[in-house]
Amino acid sequence: MLATINALADFSHSKAMADLVTAGKWKGELLATLGKVGPPRYANFIGRYKDDPDLSVRQAVAAALGLIDNETIAVPVLIQLLSRGDKKEDFAVRWEAGSSLAKVAGRKGSEGVRRRLTDLLQERNPMTAVLAARALGAVGDARGLTKLRELTSHGDAAVRQEAVLALGEAADTGSREILVRRLKDDSLTVRGCAVYALGRLGDPSLIPILSKAVEESAGYEEKYGLQAFDLRETLQEAIAAAQKSRAR
Amino acid sequence: MNGWTSRVGLLTVAGAVALLAGLAHGQDDASKVRALIRDLKDPDFDKAYGAAEQLRKYPQQRALIVAGLIDTITTRDWNRCAGDMRQTIAGALEELKAKEAVVPLLDLVKSGKSIEHECAE
């Protein structure tokens, strides 16, 4: 039902959707649709729900503000959503806010948001820094890519994981050697992310290196009894991605 | 009557027959769609669900179907799986790109009637 509304609604339905959100009905779903079709002034309305106790509503706010065309209102809220919360469940909201900031940064005349994201690279909280770097990296900003490369060797595996994934998303060929080093990371999850990221670089010459790394990781997994995820599956996807590039 | 005029006459008759057959076929489809919409409104979930599936076969009857779907989703209820039934109808409206359904669907959401998946099947 709400998916149908999302697919068919246009700006003329904004008021009706906002009224339902105010009444507390299906807030997350309708805020996301409002972000997609609402006129710019609705950014204020969406932003009001940034502190909602429901995680899915905050996540919807983060997604919606990346869609609506109102940088002045959306960016400060998104920066706040990206920077706050250290609980595990906050991560989804922070990640979504980073993705939305990347969307805003990808639009014309977005130097303001890029500057704010660059400021976040100096944050003491490494997850904030990595998510800001990811947003900058996604639009090919060298400052973001440099920070991501630096954070691939951070002490926290979750930060390394995000940095490696982001370099893969950006298909940053300049990070090839750094990513190859992560194939021997202490964390199997980071190794898996490195396999994925290297596959995204689209270089078929990496296939033997990836295969060898996955073989070694299988032994590592048996030795330590770790079950992060099936690296063989990730390897197949990475090989397919690299081969697809060769076909092009 | 020469050969040329008799050929023209035959073609005209054939064209008229085809046109009438087409109209009859359209009317036939319209009456089938009306019958299916009646079934869709039936409180029995299985009967209604079957009708919803069948309605997909008549995209050329869009106007009739959209009006029937909107009326059904906003006014009817089913003996079980009512949320699923409403989801099915909403999906059909989306397939038909029925923008005119948005306001009635928002009213339905407002009404508090079940719009969620309820049944395992």
Image (tube, rainbow, N blue to C red):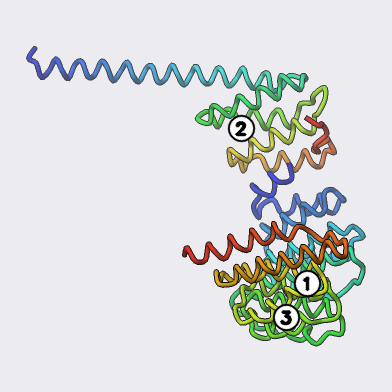
Amino acid type, callout 2: Val
At x 87%, y 61%, the residue is A225
At x 81%, y 38%, the residue is B116
Q: Nearer the viewer, residue A165 or A234?
A: A234
Q: Nearer the viewer, residue A103 or A130?
A: A130
Amino acid type, callout 3: Leu
A218 versus B41 height, above or below: below
- The Cα atoms of the two marked residues, 2 and 3, are separated by 51 Å
Disc 1, SS: helix
Which mark is drawn over residue A161?
1
Q: Is residue A70 left or right of residue A58?
A: left
A110 versus B40 height, above or below: below
Disc 2, SS: helix
* Quarter of the figure with residue B91: top right
- The Cα atoms of the two marked residues, 3 and 1, are separated by 10 Å
Q: Nearer the viewer, residue A140 or A61?
A: A140
Q: Nearer the viewer, residue A111 or A123?
A: A123
